[in-house]
Image (cartoon, grey):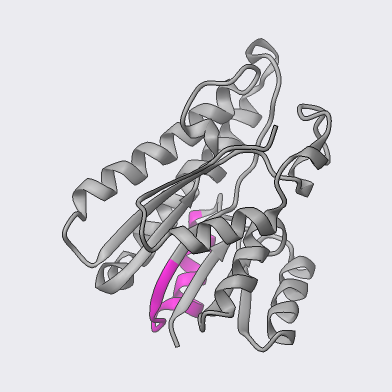
Amino acid sequence: MKTAIITGGGSGLGKELGILLSKQGFHIFLLGRTEDTLRTAAAEIEHIGGKASFAILDINSNEEIEKVYENHLTNSSISLLIHNAGVGYFGPFNESNDDELVSMFETNALGPIRLTKALLPQLEQDSTIINIISTAGLRGKKNESLYVASKFALRGFGESLQKEYEGTHLRIVNAYMGGMNTPFWDNSDHISDPSRLRSPREVAEMIVNEYQEKDEIVIESKK
């Protein structure tokens, strides 16, 4: 059975992608920082007849990435790697701080780059990487300067790998979607009414339906 690895897999878009992909026969391997949400998501996948497992991972830690690889993934047949984990801090640039800057680049860009490098020997055989970037990787946005910068970094990484691995057995897909109605906004007033946004299930369905045919997926927010 081929494996689909999903970071940030315990809730939101990551969990919905896991549910949908499990129905296509993937073993879903969920990665994230919170054991309770990972366990619940894995149980939900198994309840509908899928196969799922999980490991706790702080994507900001290169040591934890190496540990998860050595303990769980050295012999896996990885068909999909989905970089879904993300963090955002919003507001005027002059009110931002260095902790926010470091956190966003570590989670949104450096973590995916490090995890890709760790898994590259398996990925090069016949796999697809999906970078969940958001439309912040397509254009600048007011009061999102550092978040946008981190997403542009991931976009650049993905587009460069597309050129580097063109014609090989490794595909890279960059997915750009607008805001979703998820707990991402729970501690932020940047979005006044998250309920107007697309649901994680809706976005997950679009990605699963399109990733095999497209190298770039753009899903704008509902207005």
Residue 9 in view, yes or no: no
Q: Quadrant of the C terminus?
A: top right
The residue at 56%/54% (across/down) is 84
Q: Quadrant of the N terminus?
A: bottom left
The residue at 83%/28% (across/down) is 192
Q: Nearer the viewer, residue 189 or 100?
A: 189
Within the image, what quadrant is residue 88 found in?
top right
Within the image, what quadrant is residue 187 found in?
top right
- Residue reaching furthest to the left: 167
Query: Which stretch appears magenta?
Result: 62-80
Chief SS of the magenta region: helix
Within the image, what quadrant is residue 168 found in?
bottom left
198 versus 22 height, above or below: above
Residue 35 in the image: state x and y as whole percent: 74, 68
The residue at 64%/41% (across/down) is 87
Residue 175 in the image: state x and y as whole percent: 47, 47
Residue 180 in view, yes or no: yes
Residue 104 in the image: state x and y as whole percent: 58, 36
Q: Is residue 42 left or right of residue 195?
A: left
Q: Is residue 16 left or right of residue 40?
A: left
The residue at 55%/56% (across/down) is 206
Is residue 187 one of those drawn in magenta? no
Residue 123 in the image: state x and y as whole percent: 32, 68
